[in-house]
Amino acid sequence: MWKRLPAWVYIIAWIATSSAVILQNAHILSDLKFRHPVALTTIHLAFQTLATRLLRRYTNMVDKAKELEATGTMNRDSFLRKIVPVGLLFSASLVLSNWVYLRLSVSFIQMIKAFTPVSVLLVSASFGLKELTRKILLIVSLISFGVALASYGEVEFELIGFLVQALAIGIESCRLVLVQKLLQGFGLDPIASLYYLAPVCLAVNAVILLPVEGFEVFSNAVELVGIPYLLMNACLTFALNLASVSLIGRASGLVLTLSGVLKDILLIAGSWALMGSTITGIQILGYAIALAGLVWFKQQ
């Protein structure tokens, strides 16, 4: 079923679900005052773990996992060597990406994320998947300058939030490259990937949650956010992860990040128009330079 769909379907699905999740998470963490990003991520992962197991039990949508286990391709050794490292990166990326909504505006976060394709390229090169040429390095410098200029123009710039977002981008880039290698080498489809990754991420989050936020914050989630809204948010996150892994499986992590350019522009405009974010002329110039670099980069 997954292979019959054209790539543009995955791109549209990813842009729509990613935008919805970003706005919802920002609304929950900032507007609704539920300032617990680890707990919110844990709720998402618990839902995904349960959902993928129900799908395996009652449908044939996770048959790929059964096939891998029956043939011995997915065993204890391969799980520890390939699934667990990706799960660790996935968990860290999710937590840090949610945390920055407590410190930075949605519009500024999306401007910083313009550097993501560069980060993915550098990680891919370190894995031997991409080759760095002089032209590519020039494009990297152009994008980096644009992001730096946009950061300089941020009115409410906060160093800690910026550094955490930069760290999240680096971790996410490593995850994208590893997932690409995992899908190509293992033949995992999107749901089978989530079936294996979600419980690993959930376990990591549970370990982080206890000393950082504590389990009592879940009662605050019910009080401040409400079960129906939390459930809708978890469903959207599940759909986003399916779309992300599907798009990577069809193409590459770079396609996923380049597809986010349009989404980022829409989110920046929406953040300014609907959420009252302040956007300066220097930021617009810097982001325009970064986008020009991205277009040039895509042509390569």
Image: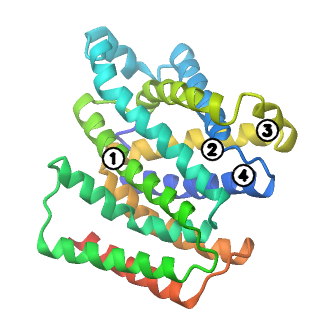
Q: Earlier in the sequence, mark 4 or mark 3?
A: 4
**Residue tagged by mark 1?**
174
State the separation of the CA atoms marked 3 and 1: 31 Å
Q: Position of residue 158 (x, y in %)?
A: 59, 68
Q: Position of residue 16 (x, y in %)?
A: 57, 57
**Residue tagged by mark 3?**
221
* Amino acid type of the residue that numbered disc 2 sits on in the rendered structure: Leu
Q: Earlier in the sequence, mark 3 or mark 1?
A: 1
Q: Which mark is residue 260?
A: none
* Amino acid type of the residue that numbered disc 4 sits on in the rendered structure: Leu
* Amino acid type of the residue that numbered disc 1 sits on in the rendered structure: Cys
Q: Earlier in the sequence, mark 3 or mark 2?
A: 3
Vertical relation: 16 (above or below) 184: below
Residue neighbourhood size for the residue with mark 1, other residues' Cα within 10 Å, grouped as few (<14), some (14–19), many (≥20)? many
Residue neighbourhood size for the residue with mark 4, other residues' Cα within 10 Å, grouped as few (<14), some (14–19), many (≥20)? many
Q: Residue furthest right?
A: 223
Q: Earlier in the sequence, mark 1 or mark 4?
A: 4
* Amino acid type of the residue that numbered disc 3 sits on in the rendered structure: Ala
Q: Which mark is residue 29?
A: 4
Vertical relation: 54 (above or below) 7: above
